[in-house]
Amino acid sequence: MENSSVTERSLQIEQEIKKDPHKVLKLITTVSTFGGLLFGYDTGVINGALPFMAQPDQLNLTPITEGLVASSLILGAAFGSLFGGRLSDLKGRRQAILSLAIVFFFATLGCVFAPNATVMVIFRFILGLAVGGASVIVPSYLAEMSPSNRRGMLVTRNELMIVTGQFLAYVFNAVIGSALGDTGHVWRYMLVVATLPAVVLWVGVLILPESPRWLVSKGKIAEALKVLQQIRTEGLAKQELNEIKENIAKEKKIRAAKFKDLGTPWIRRIVFIGIGVGAISQLVGINSIMYYGTQILQSSGFGTKASLIGNVANGLIAVLAVIVGMSILQKVNRRKMLLTGLTGVTVALITIGISNQVLAGSPTLPYVVLSMTLVYLAFFQGAIGPMSWLILSEIFPARLRGMGMGSAVLFLWLSNFLVGLFFPVLLNGMGLSGTFFLFSAFGILGIVIIVKFLPETRGLTLEQIEANFKAM
């Protein structure tokens, strides 16, 4: 009965789409990016939930177990990003996203009902597998469904949904924390909200078509053409089908690079730059604010409820910054935008560190820290975040993309994990100033790497970018 209703709904959607091919693209973008929304909510909700979890009558967390609860999701995401692509290649993009929705739902429930820190860490790790898978599969699905002239705009919608998910997490944290802050298990109410978008994602994906590129790769040419006819005009559908077949045939002839190819100087240079960009984008401490923003504001002098409300401003600035970053992405050179972002976050970090020492005990300190975290997020989410992923997608030629992108993303997630794991320990041992000075040192290192080693990639073909690296 359920399959029948889904089939009927699919037929209705197909009839509507034939009138306007853009409708299915809107549907695909809206539904599939719920994976990004879940990514954002599950990474952001821990920000407000941790202070309540840490209480003695709850999970009784120490600095190291706090770090494990926050960062176990990221460790899971590192593995999820590695295996997510393989799962989608084997089962298809649509089926892979359906599977992720199920993992999101049940792993969230596991976290909600966790009786102790060990169980919480286990289910956060499982939740991370879904987060990492979504970070790879959803952008790939969007890229393969989008027409070339709209691909950049539609794919970056996923980044917007991620920060929107984090913003919603901060809003729910503030509302639930303010209303139920005296309730022992308030953090469980914060976590359970994530089951709702997981259900929406699962139901929505049931009526979405499979990627035509994946269908062609499996020899299902007729099915691929049918999907393209739903989302393109008739002439463009057949033309794109031929292009997909040609590209897949070319890719099969390309010899994928292996780790032994790192002996070639220009290949080694590209891979190491990719790893550097990925790692530095996390080692400047973005996730200390995304995961521990409430505790940072508490340590500067705000109360718990005021800190939860202050985090809403952080989330709002992040969303606005991504929108601005998306609007200027194709108008500003990559190096200039990335350098501006790194300079901005480094200055903000140093200012927070100095203010925490000079204004210790002053009633103005919490407001200085909050304003500087807003500046930090504006520069990071508006420049470093989207630009890092864009650069990583551009610098690797076809035969290097698997090894190079895989290595860069792995180091990105591992750096993210290290920040999440050790931030409570660093905060406890070095204080807020020392910790943020450490992050600023990575910002300075990133500026040096970009200035010395990264060539400009805007407006260049992949072949031209490869030639520039060979000439360095």
Image: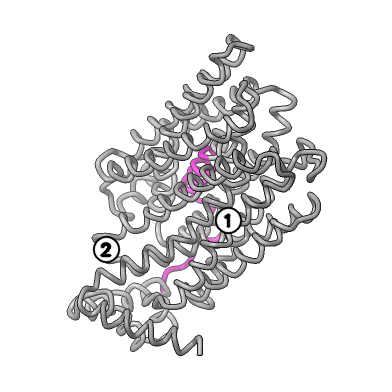
- How many numbered circles does the render carry? 2
- Residue flagged by tag 1: what amino acid is it? Val
Residue for badge 1: 193
387 relative position to 202: left or right: left
Give neighbour class at mark 1: few <14, some 14-19, many 20+ (Cα, 10 Å): some
**Which is in the foreground here, disc 2 or disc 1?**
1
Residue range corresponding to the magenta coloring: 253-281
x and y, in percent, of residue 449 in the image: 47, 33
Neighbours of disc 2 within 10 Å: few (<14), some (14-19), many (20+) = few
Front residue (pair 241, 141) = 141
What SS does tag 2 mark? helix
* Residue occupying image coordinates x 41% and y 31%: 451
For the stretch drawn in magenta, the main secondary structure is: helix
Query: Quadrant location of the C terminus?
Result: top left
Q: Which residue is mark 2?
A: 148
Residue that extends furthest to the left in the rendered view of this protein: 235
Q: From the top left corner, tell me how far across and down residue 237 is, in percent.
A: 24, 78
